[in-house]
């Protein structure tokens, strides 16, 4: 966009190299480390892949259809307290939502439906 504007303004008398030198003066290109260098991320990715494989085996789904389980896994990760966040769940910190109890929702195996449990009086 900048090149096109300058080309129109100067009627093509400026080269791309001159533009780069002019607009990128003082900028440096820093190559970040490749993702496989970060061991903690790789460990988390391995765990996620293992859980997705377990879901596929448990629900007898083809391994190519693992994307169906991503929202379930994402919800689980977002609602799990993390020590690095002060034992708070990401959903608490980023959205300001209270962390629901895992026992708030239950599966009725006989009727094959999910039911919400009423709140217990304290």
Image: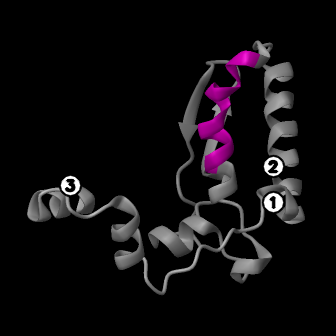
**Closer to the camera in the image, 47 or 93:** 47
**Closer to the camera in the image, 17 or 40:** 17
Q: Which quarter of the picture shows residue 86?
A: bottom right
Q: Is residue 14 above or below residue 74?
A: below
The residue positioned 79% from the left and 77% from the top of the image is: 83
Mark 1 neighbour class, 10 Å CA radius: few under 14, some 14 to 19, many 20 or more: few
Reading the image, the residue beneath label 1 is: 41
The residue positioned 80% from the left and 44% from the top of the image is: 48
Q: In the rendered structure, which disc, 1 or 3, sits on the residue that comes first in sequence? A: 3
Q: Which image quarter holds the N terminus? A: bottom left
Q: Nearer the viewer, mark 3 or mark 2?
A: 3
Tell me residue 14's x, y (percent).
25, 64
Q: Which quarter of the picture shows residue 62?
A: top right
**Tag 3's secondary structure?**
helix
| Numbered mark located on residue 4 in the image | 3
Reading the image, the residue beneath label 2 is: 45
- Report the magenta stretch's main SS: helix
Q: Is residue 28 visible?
A: yes
Distance from disc 1 to disc 2, alpha carbons, whole Å, reads 6 Å
Q: Are marks 1 and 3 in contact (CB under 8 Å)?
A: no
Q: Which residues are magenta?
A: 64-75
Mark 3 neighbour class, 10 Å CA radius: few under 14, some 14 to 19, many 20 or more: few
Tell me residue 46's x, y (percent).
87, 46
Distance from disc 1 to disc 3, alpha carbons, whole Å, reads 41 Å
């Amino acid at each position: 966009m900048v090149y096109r504007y300058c080309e129109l303004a100067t009627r093509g008398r400026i080269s791309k190299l001159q533009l780069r030198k002019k607009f990128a003066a003082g900028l440096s290109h820093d190559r970040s480390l490749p993702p496989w260098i970060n061991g903690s991320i790789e460990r988390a990715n391995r765990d996620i892949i293992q859980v997705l494989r377990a879901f596929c085996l448990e629900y007898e789904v083809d391994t190519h259809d693992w994307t169906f389980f991503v929202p379930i896994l994402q919800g689980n990760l977002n609602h799990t307290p993390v020590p690095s966040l002060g034992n708070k769940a990401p959903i608490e910190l980023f959205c300001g939502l209270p962390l629901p109890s895992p026992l708030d929702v239950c599966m009725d195996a006989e009727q094959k439906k999910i039911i919400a449990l009423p709140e217990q009086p304290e």
